[in-house]
Image (cartoon, rainbow, N blue to C red):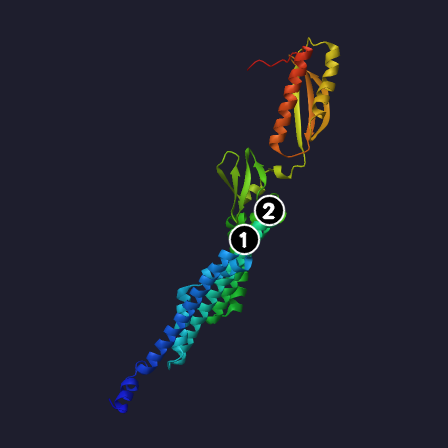
Amino acid sequence: MSPNHLHELLFAREVLGNSPAHWGAALLVFLASLILLLTVKRVLRRRVASWMKRSSSEAVALVSAVIAVTRGPLLTVVALYLGVQVLYLPDEVRGGAHVVATLAVLLQGGFWANALLTHMINARTRRGLEGDAASATTLSVLGFLCQWVLWTILALLALENLGVNVTTLVAGLGVGGVAVALAAQTVLRDPLASLSIILDKPFVLGDNIAVGDLTGTVEYIGLRTTKVRSVSGEQLIFPNSDLLQSRIRNYKRMQERRAAFTLAVAYETPLDKLRQIPNWIQRIVEQKPQVRFDRSHFKEYGTIALNFETVYFMLTTDYKQFMDTQQQINLEILERFAQEGIKFVHAPPA
């Protein structure tokens, strides 16, 4: 085949303004770019997997999270854009290819930034739960807000790349946002309540709380709901707005636990023994560890018995220790009263 015939074969038959040689070169650039990008991703993934077996450092885990969200289709779009650069194309087509490639890069950058944010916030949250649960709760919500801001910025950049006047759009959204907020007060009530919970911190992750007659441990604080694991095992889900309108008892923040009980003693008990009952109870209570005795008195004349009231405080919030102490006090009072021949009186069943 003569050189002239070869030149005609390669360059004479143009398709969309480009010869077969140009299309072939574009295909080679596209394939080479795609193979290179996918190979780099694969090599990095293997290297990181090997590093993670030898070390559990935060940096390695961070790189692994970034590689995991690297999208093959977006890499394909970038490789295709590089291949298109070889061709002779109209300005409109070339501009369109540039827009598509820019959108792909922005989207991939968003995935990377989101993975970095999520990984760092999750790591901080895990460390915070071991030390300061309030900070961990704040971080979880701030993480969501940061992600929302990130994707909002990327969306605005994408719209600007598409030729939309972002300044005018933002100004219009600012005016329209007020009207939307007024019309969507019910929808926004729970997210606003969530923000109030995060800032005011009536409870944080891990706190044991009671709402009405429901008690449990806070497991999750979201934009719309708070999830609590009840003492009986089931998960309780409260709308955040309802929580702010309820009386919440936070047992984890107790500094001491108050205990009060009443003893009904028979009227025929001798007077000298009635005078000694508060002293006996005081000595029994004060002998217990982590206890601060408050008072014990002959309170009142009951319908069928003489009522003695005792109050003391446990200097720990541990409920099991509280109940163990109360049990010991009850048994020792019962034993002492039996020794003194003092009888308890019980009201007849209704």
Check disc 2 and report the residue beneath it: 130
Vertical placement of residue 261 versus 273, above or below:
below
Check disc 1 and report the residue beneath it: 122
Q: Secondary structure at mark 2?
A: helix
Residue 170 on image: x %, y %: 53, 65
Q: Within the image, what quadrant is residue 39 found in?
A: bottom left
Q: Is residue 37 visible?
A: yes
Query: Is 146 situated left or right of 89 in this image?
Result: right
Residue 190 on image: x %, y %: 53, 47
Disc 1 marks which amino acid?
Answer: Asn
| Quarter of the image where the N terminus is located | bottom left
At 65% across and 37% down in the image, what residue appears?
Answer: 254
- Name the residue furthest front: 54
Vertical placement of residue 244 versus 313, above or below:
below
Label 2 environment density (alpha carbons within 10 Å; few <14, some 14–19, many ≥20): few
Query: Is 96 situated left or right of 308 in this image?
Result: left
Counting every numbered tag in the picture gives 2
Q: Nearer the viewer, mark 2 or mark 1?
A: 2
Q: Is residue 69 visible?
A: no
Q: Nearer the viewer, residue 324 or 166?
A: 324
At 65% across and 16% down in the image, what residue appears?
Answer: 335
Q: Earlier in the sequence, mark 2 or mark 1?
A: 1
Disc 2 marks which amino acid?
Answer: Glu
Q: Which mark is residue 66?
A: none
Q: Nearer the viewer, residue 132 or 274?
A: 132
Residue 104 on image: x %, y %: 44, 68
Q: Within the image, what quadrant is residue 71 found in?
A: bottom left
Residue 158 on image: x %, y %: 47, 68
| Quarter of the image where the C terminus is located | top right
Q: CA distance from mark 2 to mark 1?
A: 13 Å
Q: Within the image, what quadrant is residue 297 found in?
A: top right
